[in-house]
Amino acid sequence: MTLKTTLTAVAAALAVTTGIAAIPVSAHSHKAAAAASPNIVEVAMSTGVHNTLVAAVKAAGLVDTLSSPGPFTVFAPTDTAFAKLPAGTVATLVKPENKGTLTKILTYHAVPGKVTAADLTALINKHGGKATITTVAGEKLTARLSGETIVITDAKGGATAVTQADVMTSNGVVHVTDGVFLPA
């Protein structure tokens, strides 16, 4: 099964379990959007604060996937967020022999479909203050509000704030985070 097929299957499952469906993008509207705005990878490359994320995406071989039409929602840790990991973690993860682990971590930061902060907030409110979302990696994240800030809790119990929401791209949306999600 290819990653693209897996993403499609996860998008369908996400729509059923959370009520958030992927927003279809026609080929024509995607071409127009692509001309008007950069894709997820191009946005990450242009920020100056996602260099570690871009290097990890390249090492995992996910550039083509995250440059494809999508749509995807990506929770994008900054370089500062990666720096909070134990010393040597990133250097170890980007080694070719750790590609599987790196891919799992990176796909744990992606959700199929275009999920805006308003969509996520509505889902949190609908489910009594917290919402569980399924990532491309097939694992769960829990979202809640702390004041007006969306906070995501990963499988290891780490809480990460969305520091900048709704960075729109031609193939989805990016939410900048101050931490790295760690799968189970």
Image (cartoon, helix red, strand yellow):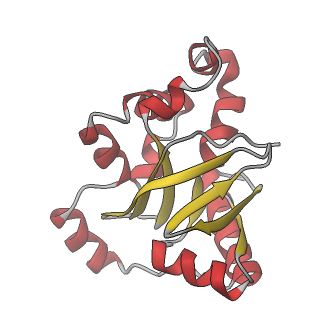
| Residue 10 shows in this picture | yes
Give the quarter of the image for residue 55.
top left
| Residue 116 shows in this picture | no
Tell me: residue 168, above or below residue 127.
Answer: above
Residue displayed at 60% across by 59% down: 151
- Answer left or right for 100 relative to 145: right
**Number of numbered discs present?**
0
Position in image of residue 111 (x %, y %): 59, 62
Residue displayed at 67% across by 85% down: 19
- Answer left or right for 171 relative to 13: left
- Residue furthest out toward the front: 147
Looking at the picture, tell me which residue is in the foreground, 89 or 17.
Answer: 89
Looking at the picture, tell me which residue is in the foreground, 118 or 31.
Answer: 118
For the C terminus, the image quarter is top right
Give the quarter of the image for residue 54.
top left
Position in image of residue 79 (x %, y %): 43, 30
Residue displayed at 52% across by 80% down: 119
Residue displayed at 20% across by 73% down: 32
Position in image of residue 68 (x %, y %): 41, 56
Position in image of residue 108 (x %, y %): 66, 48
- Residue furthest out toward the right: 184
Tell me: residue 150, above or below residue 61.
Answer: below
Give the quarter of the image for residue 85.
top right
Looking at the picture, tell me which residue is in the foreground, 94 or 158.
Answer: 158
